[in-house]
Amino acid sequence: MADPDPDPDAVTLRLIASGVVQAYQLTAQGEALSVPYPASLQRGLDRLTLARLSVGKRPPAGVPELLRWCAEPLGEWMSVRELDANDEVLLSDGRPTLVCEELVVRAPDVEAEIFENEMITEVMRISRAAGSEESYAAFRRFVIEHPVLSEIQFQEALLRAELSVLAAQLGECYCTPPVEYQQDGCVVTCSDCGNLLLFGSEGYECKDIRCPRGTAPQIGRRLEMKTGVRSLVAPVQRFVAAPGRAELRLYRKLGEIGVDVELWPNFDAYDLRGQVFSWVLVGSGRERLGESFPPRAETPSDPA
């Protein structure tokens, strides 16, 4: 089974390319390039520094030297085994090249965006190869409904036929809860969104900005670390689980009024597809409940 982890050198290269373009945009607007540098550029430098030191090579002394390196062929200063780009440069005459532009990831958190894209792409590829839309939908729904779970719950999930083919990918979506969330050998979850609660000076805090709570968070579950606990890694929690909660709420609301609804049909062609009489309606579950949901009608299905 293919490893879903993005190539670390490719991630570093995309971080640097994204940072180079951001830096160019700043200077093109007449701003001086100074500390703090664009986050992607600094993070790319940090990763490149560690990678070169680990193999006994000198890293760039800082962002200014890194930008000078960007005018040199990529193959001279970093590994680009996933790309046929050893002779390419990221900067030419002080401007980002076409190759540089193509490598840009336009997202606030480049690493998280790459991880999420790679993971979902791999899940979709494996599900398609198995001819199982059910596996893809089950994977999406599982991570949305289980932001935190016990090791026993996780292992039981892998026994489900539709999830067993995605065991490795599901494992990549979870990690041991961060130490700062652990207290007295336990972690606690939010009763509203199910995510971990952080204990601070004013009590428990839920760090999920999409949590539907209206007041101070309440404890949902208390899990002992000694029995094994898993929580979603940040990119999956942020880009899959958090927005997915709205999709599930809408799915359930439509079901309550008798609409036959499918989640992520045809490998995510739509978020939701529901049938009312002979009309098939498709739309995005990311619309907030309480606002109008403007479904779009497809070709009518054959009447029963």
Image (cartoon, helix red, strand yellow):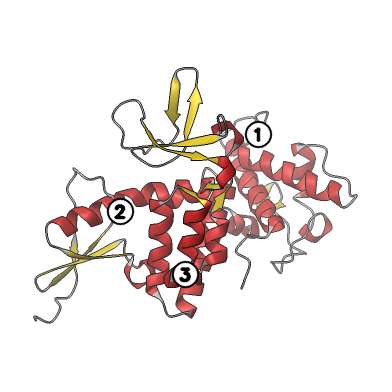
* Three-letter residue code for mark 2: Glu
In the depicted structure, whether residue 90 falls above or below residue 22? below
Disc 2 is placed on an element classified as helix
Mark 3 crowd level (few <14, some 14–19, many ≥20, 10 Å Cα): many
Q: Which amino acid does label 3 sit on?
A: Met
**Residue drawn at 72 percent across, 65 percent down:** 85
Left or right relative to 148: residue 37: right
- Whether residue 294 is visible: no
Q: Which residue is depicted at the point 51% across and 36% down? A: 187
Q: Which residue is drawn at 18% across and 57% down?
A: 254
Secondary structure under badge 3? helix
Q: Which residue is drawn at 77% across and 64% down?
A: 87
Image quadrant occupied by the N terminus: bottom right
Residue 178 lies in quadrant = top right
Q: Where is residue 260 in the image (x, y as percent from the top left)?
A: 18, 66
Whether pointer 2 and pointer 3 mark residues with C-beta atoms closer than 8 Å, the reply is no
| Mark seen at residue 247 | 2
What whole-number distance in Å separates the C-alpha atoms at marks 3 and 1? 36 Å
For mark 3, what is the residue? 124
Q: Which amino acid does label 1 sit on?
A: Tyr
Circle 2 residues within 10 Å: few <14, some 14–19, many ≥20: many
Q: Which of 54 and 212 is in front in this view?
A: 212
The front one of 160 and 56 is 160
Q: Give the x, y percent position of residue 189.
A: 43, 38
Q: Mark 1 points at which residue?
A: 37
95, 128: nearer the viewer: 128
Q: Can you give x and y, in whole percent of width and height, for residue 168 in the image?
A: 57, 65
The reply, left or right, for residue 292 in relation to residue 191 is: left
User: Mark 2 or mark 1: which comes first in sequence?
Assistant: 1
